[in-house]
Image: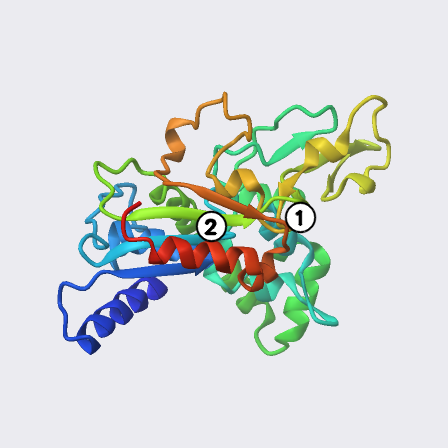
Amino acid sequence: MTSARQLGVLIEQIRADHQDPALQVDIVAHSMGGLIARYYLSYGGQDVLNGEAFVPNYAGEHRVRRVALLGTPNVGSVSSLHAFISGRKIGLGTMRTETLATFPSVYQLFPHPLNNWIIAEDGSALDVDLFSPDTWRRFRWSIFDPQTKRRIIADHPQQGDHYYAALEKEFAQQLERARRFVWSLTVTLERNPWELRVFGGDCALTPARILVEEVGGASRIRLWPHELAQPRPGIDYDRLMLEPGDGSVTKASLLARDSLNPAIPRPGYSYFAVSGEMFVCEQHDRLSTNISFQDNLLQYLLTTDL
C-alpha cells in the first residue's frame, strides 16, 4: 500500500503548500494509478489486505473533489495476464515473466475473481481460480513453467533452489493479496463524497478472455484467436476472446461491468459509482496525449457545478 500512502502524503503536502487544510484536490489517474486512487479514497494508506474485512474509512472525504480515471482496469485486465504468461514487450526487448513476478502491482491488475476471463473451445466459461497457485502450476504459467524454472535457478548459481523456493512462496502471497485488493475495490460504499468519471479507448480489439484448447489429450492455453490449432466451425473466436477497448483495457473493465449491454445490470460485486464516461479512439499508452481527451478533461475539471 506504499503508493496509496504516498498519494496521501502528496495531497497533504499540496494542502500545506496552499496553506489551506480544507483544500480538496482533483486527481487525474492513468491505468493502475486509477486503482491506487480508488483504494486511497476508501482506505487511505491503511493496509486492509491482510484479512477479509474491507471496512472503508473514507480517507478521501474532504480531501478529494473529483477523480478522472483514464484507461483504468476497474475489474482487471486480461492483458496483464498475457504479460505474466509470456513476458511483456518493452521496446526491442521483453521483460521476462520471472521479473514481472517480483512486482506486487502487476498481480493487482488481474481480472476480478468473478469475471468470465477464461473459456473452453466451445465458448463456455470455465471455473478456474486465477488467484490460486494451483492454477498456475496446472497450466505451467510464469515461474511454474519448467523452462522458466530452469532459467531462474541458472541465474542464481549459488542459491538457485533456495531462491526459487522463496519466489514460489512470495508468488502465492502476492496472489492472495491481489485477490483481496480487487475485492476491496468492489465493496459497496454507504456514501460517495467524491466524484468519479471514466475516460478511455473503445475502438481497439482488446484481450477479454483466454481459451483452453484440448489437443491430443493435453490442455493448451490460447491467448489469441489465431493460435487455436483446431477451431470449431461456426464459432466466432474473435468475438469470444476480444472486446472493444484501448488494446490493454476493455471498455467493459473501464466501466466495471461484465457486459457492455446496458440492459444487463452491473452485478452486486462490482459496485462502482461513476458520474459519467467519455471514449476516444486511442491506444492505452497514448490516451493522455489525445487532444479530445484533454479537451474534455479540462472542461470536466473547470466546471464548478456538475
Residue 169 visible in this rendered orientation of the protein = no
> Nearest the camera: 25 or 170?
25
Q: Is residue 278 left or right of residue 92?
A: left
Name the residue type under label 2.
Leu
Task: Name the image quarter holding residue 94.
Answer: bottom right
User: What residue would you read off at disc 1?
Assistant: 140
Residue displayed at 66% across by 31% down: 119
Picture residue at 34% right of the left edge, 66% below the top: 2
Q: Which residue is label 2 attached to?
A: 175
- In the rendered view of the protein, which quadrant contains the N terminus? bottom left
Q: With 87 as the anchor, is 164 left or right in this view? A: left
The mark found on residue 5 in the picture is none
Q: Residues within 10 Å of mark 1 (few under 14, many from 20)?
A: some
Residue 287, percent from left and from top: 57, 58
Residue 78 spot, x, y in % from top left: 60, 45
**Number of on-image labels:** 2
Residue 231 can be seen in this image = yes
Q: Quadrant of residue 239?
A: top right
Give the CA separation, mark 1 to mark 2.
Answer: 15 Å
**In the rendering, at what x and y percent does residue 161 appear?**
58, 66
Left or right: where 260 falls relative to 140 = left
Q: Residues within 10 Å of mark 2 (few under 14, many from 20)?
A: many
Name the mark nearer the viewer: 1 or 2: 2
The front one of 6 and 126 is: 6
Q: Which element carries disc 1, helix, strand or loop?
A: loop
Q: Is residue 123 left or right of residue 256?
A: right
- The residue sitting at 47% across, 54% down in the picture is 296
Q: Please tell me whether mark 2 sits on a helix, a strand or a loop.
A: helix
Residue 236 lies, in percent from the top left, at 77, 28
Amino acid at the residue labelled 1: Arg
